[in-house]
Image (tube, grey):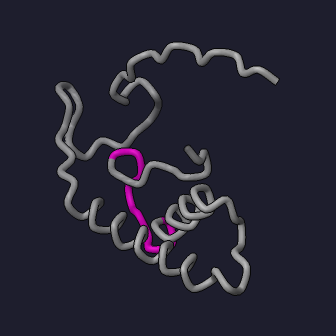
Amino acid sequence: MCRSIKTLREPYTEQVTTEDVQAAALQYVRKISGFRAPAAHNAEAFQAAVDAVSRATADLLDRLEVRASPGRPAGAAAGGGAARSPRPARAPSPARAG
């Protein structure tokens, strides 16, 4: 996905602003639409999508319940990768034919 979108939930981000949510929504819509800035005839649909993604993101963040992991206090801020949940290794993708 888009590397410009950062994790917006605790403990990775202590305080999320409306601007953070809107920036992530904009990056998402840019990525899936393939447009950095839409043409005038698509501007309304583009902005409506950004607004919808912003609302969905804010709703998700409001409803998430972040529980403390064993050995880590509930309000601990992320200091490094060691505190994150381990992710399963992915198999390398096959080489693409040119």
**Secondary structure of the magenta portion, mostly?**
loop
Nearer to the camera, 46 or 83:
46
Q: 1 or 59, which is in the foreground? A: 1
Is residue 57 rendered to the left or right of residue 31? left
Give me the residue at 23% from left, 31% from top. 72
Residue range highlighted in magenta: 11-20
Which quarter of the picture shows residue 54? bottom left
Q: Quadrant of the C terminus?
A: top right
In reply to whether residue 59 is colored magenta, the answer given is no
Q: Residue at x 54, y 52 (%)?
A: 5
Q: Residue at x 57, y 85 (%)?
A: 44
Image location of residue 7, percent across then percent down: 44, 49
Residue 22 % position (x, y): 50, 71
Q: Position of residue 69 (x, y in %)?
A: 20, 31
| 98 lies above or below 55 | above
Q: Quadrant of residue 67?
A: top left
Q: Quadrant of the N terminus?
A: top right
Number of labels in the image equals 0
Front one among 32 and 63: 32
Q: Is residue 48 left or right of residue 69?
A: right
Viewed as shown, does residue 21 lie left or right of 30? left
On screen, residue 64 above or below 44: above
Left of 30 or right of it: where is 55? left
